[in-house]
Amino acid sequence: MKITRKMISNILFWGFLLFLFTPYGASIKAKLIQGVTYVKAMIFSTSANKIEEREKITSLNLSLKGISNASDINLKEAKGKVIFINYWATWCPPCRAEMPSIQSLYNDYKDKITFVFITSDEKSKVDKYYTENNFNLPTYNVLSNPAAQISTRSLPTTFVIDKKGNLAVKETGASNWNSSGVRKMLDNLIKE
């Protein structure tokens, strides 16, 4: 049987599709999305809503079970602080793409704002993912229903709540959370 250029092309095409749509391609997809995320960050900047345009969160009463690097808490304990909430999953390529930037942000701001990483993944999956990637983010499973303003079914989704309990930022999709624009925004929210 003679191997033709078309046969090679078809094999490469189907191999590429299988690779991208199976667990073997997850890290490659994350790297591709990470590249797109950094380009997006250069073009668009995440910024907080103006104070007068922020929606009041109806309730910060949200019970959370600490599963990695965290103890059980209720979000209302963070009232009066800036709160960074990120919904994510270990299997989600866009989530994986933004995690290195979030870890860098967390390293510098963990004493200034409250970070809450919410997942439906089991503790063992999260711990394995964190160990493989040298992450140490405070991660929780939800025990009660969040207020509508901070509830989502899209991953990743990030909310930033100001000190008065208002929604300052809602960002769906992967972002570069370690940009100078995000840091400036957080510094301003901390000063408010």
Image (tube, rainbow, N blue to C red):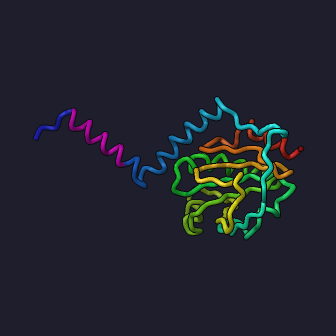
Q: Main secondary structure of the magenta part?
A: helix
Coordinates of residue 17 in the picture (x, y in percent): 35, 44
Residue drawn at (63%, 49%) of the image: 157
Farthest residue toward the right?
A: 192
Coordinates of residue 65 in the picture (x, y in percent): 68, 69
Nearer-the-camera pick, 112 or 45: 45
> Taking 16 as reference, is 3 left or right?
left
Nearer-the-camera pick, 50 or 123: 50
Residue drawn at (60%, 44%) of the image: 174
Coordinates of residue 132 in the picture (x, y in percent): 56, 59
Quadrant assignment, res 15: top left
Is 97 a magenta residue? no
Q: Evaluate whether residue 184 shows in this view.
A: no
Callout count: 0
Name the quadrant of the C terminus: top right
Is 11 a magenta residue? yes
Q: Evaluate whether residue 64 shows in this view.
A: yes
Farthest residue toward the top?
A: 43
Position of residue 88 relative to residue 8, above or below, is below
Quadrant assignment, res 11: top left
- Residue extent of the magenta highlight: 6-18
Name the quadrant of the N terminus: top left
Residue drawn at (55%, 38%) of the image: 35
Residue drawn at (74%, 40%) of the image: 182
Farthest residue toward the left?
A: 1
Coordinates of residue 175 in the picture (x, y in percent): 63, 42
Nearer-the-camera pick, 179 or 163: 163
